[in-house]
Image (cartoon, rainbow, N blue to C red):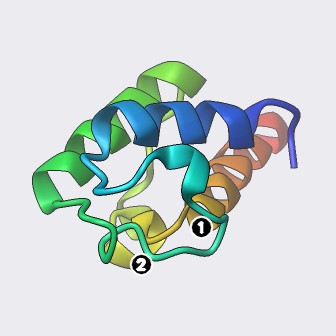
Amino acid sequence: MIDGIDERVREVVGSLGRLSVAVDAVGPADDLYRLGMTSTATLNVMLALEEAFDIEFPEELLERSIFESLSTIGTAISGVLDQRRTA
């Protein structure tokens, strides 16, 4: 994974995810929706991540499962960045 992705994802989710626990207590695979993230918070997180990484999530990644955990979000961002580099 690209340096800094995990940390930045954690920062964005911590500030906009509306979680019921501190983001520092969230493991990489923990279900963010079970921890309180709503669909509105997901949209805010997605938009902030697009801005933070200067990317646009393609339509096929706009699914609840992509934003379910810190790990799945980081993997999706890495994939988008990899595609951009090879394009």
Q: Residue 33 location in percent, x, y?
A: 30, 72
Depicted 57 relative to depicted 59: above or below:
above
Question: At 44% across and 21% down in the image, what residue appears?
Answer: 51
Is residue 84 visible to us here? no
Left or right of 60? Residue 79 is right
Left or right of 20? Residue 83 is right
Q: Residue 23 location in percent, x, y?
A: 50, 46
Depicted 17 relative to depicted 72: above or below:
above
Q: Amino acid at mark 2?
A: Ser
Q: Which residue is mark 2?
A: 65
Is residue 75 visible to us here? yes
Q: Amino acid at mark 1?
A: Thr
Looking at this view, is 81 or 46 the one in front? 46
Left or right of 20? Residue 61 is right
Q: Which residue is mark 1?
A: 72
Proximity of marks 2 and 1: CB atoms separated by less than 8 Å:
yes
Q: Which mark is residue 40?
A: none
Q: Quadrant for residue 8, please give it.
A: top right
Q: Residue 1 location in percent, x, y?
A: 87, 50
Ranked by sequence position, the earlier of labels 2 and 1 is: 2
State the count of labels: 2
